[in-house]
Structures are given as structure tokens and as C-alpha cells.
Image (tube, grey):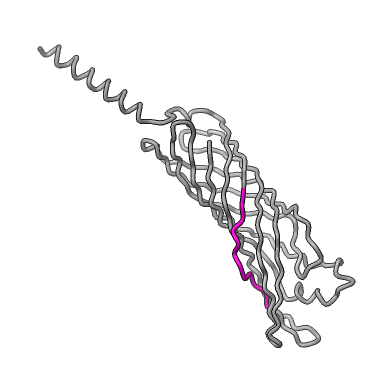
Amino acid sequence: MWLVLSVTAVAGVDLSAQRNDKLLNRPYADMRWVHLGFSVGAYTETTALTNNGFVTDEGESWFIDQAAYSPGFCVNGLVDFRLNNYFNLRLSPGMYFGNRVLKFRDATSGNVEQQNLKSTYVVVPVDIKFSSLRNHNLRPYVTAGAMGAFDVGKQRNEQLKFDTANVFLTFGFGCDFYLPYFKFNPEIKFCIGFLDRLKHDRPDLADEPDKLKYTQSLSKATSQMVVLTFYFE
């Protein structure tokens, strides 16, 4: 009798384990040393402008800020390298398409002007991903890294002009959802640019010197982004 009960108990545990294994989608997905994927998403970019109170010879004092936050669209590839059970190195080159609106206000006359900034970024993010232990078909994670961005869109001789290249420090968080055929990862990332992107030297305005007053009214311009991304791995 004791032998029969023991065999029955072991068989029950084995069947239970098998049933639990069947509940796990893609149980070995995280064991590969490298895998590929792609992502789509949306982002907003803020241009932080430092006004310096410059006054022109005509007595104008222009103050400039970003008036609108239009969401942009982004698409990326993904190469993920497994470092160990908790850490991954992720490369996700892609493109960001967006638009911002800057407002120019003259404090003396009240005149208002604006400039549309259309951006087409080629980005190269490099992130370290730290994941928690997997809980059934969920696995939360955080990321930290850096992102190079290059604006390949054409810039006209408008009020302000910005450098092509920028560098962002990034951090974010997300969660891996293990589906039967792929992993789905929604992620929020915060990108903080630390380079002054404003072009202070404007030889292109030699024929329009009056436009130089807008550049002279700013000390620097930096960028920040918030990116909502959906990865498919």
C-alpha cells in the first residue's frame, strides 16, 4: 500500500509539473545568446531653450519657447545579446519622425512669430537591460544606456538652426509578455540630451541679418524625449 501511494504521489507531482510547463509560453526564449526583433512606437520631444534677455538696437527683446508637443513616430530594429540570466545588451537602430513648433514673442511690441521644426532622426540606442525573475509569462525590466541621434532632414534659413548630431542619456522600464509565438514588450524610455544643439554661428544669414536676433536671444538649446515603444521579439 505504501509503495502504491508513493508511486501515485510521484506521478501526481510529475503530471502537475507537466501541466505547469504547458502554461509557460516560449520557456527557452531567454536562453539564446542572441535574438532579433523590431519595434514601433511614438515619442514627444521637448526643446529646452535658455533665453538670455538680449535686446536689439531697435529695443526688441525676444523670448522663445516650444509652444506645441506633437507626437512623432518611430520604428527600430533590435539585436539583443544575452550576457547572463539577468542582463542583456540591446542595440536598436532606427528612425524617428516628428515636428515641433517654436514661438517667438517680442516683450516690447507683443509681436509673435513661430517656426516649425521637422525632424528626421537616425538613432543608434545602446542599452543594458536588467530583468527580474520570470513570473509565469511576465518579466518586468529596467534599462539604462545612451543614444546617438542624427537629424538628416533638410534645414532652411529660418530663425533658428540646430546641429545635426545629438547624444542622449537614456533610462526606462517595461515588461516582457511571453506569447505563444513571440515576446511582446511595451516600454517607456526617457532620453536626456546634454549637448547644446543651437547653431550660434550663422553665416547663412549674411543676406538676412535681421534674423540673427533670434539666435542672439538664446544661450543654448537642449533636447529631451519621452518614447513609448512596442517591441516584438
Q: Is residue 64 above or below residue 150?
A: below
Where does the image place residue 232, in percent across and percent down from the top left? 53, 38
Q: Is residue 151 magenta?
A: no
- Residue at 71% x, 80% y is 62
- Farthest left residue? 1
Provide the residue span drawn in magenta. Answer: 63-74
What secondary structure is the stretch in magenta mostly built from?
strand
Task: Check the picture and name the quadrant holding the N terminus.
Answer: top left
- Residue at 55% x, 55% y is 190
Residue 212: which quarter of the image?
A: bottom right
Q: Is residue 44 above or below residue 30?
A: below
Q: Is residue 73 magenta?
A: yes
- Residue at 51% x, 51% y is 188
Q: Is residue 13 above or below residue 73?
A: above
Where does the image place residue 230, in percent across and percent down from the top left? 53, 45
Residue 33: which quarter of the image?
A: top right
Where does the image place residue 148, in percent across and percent down from the top left? 67, 50
Q: Nearer the viewer, residue 193 or 228?
A: 228
Q: Nearer the viewer, residue 74 or 128?
A: 74
Q: Is residue 49 left or right of residue 81?
A: right
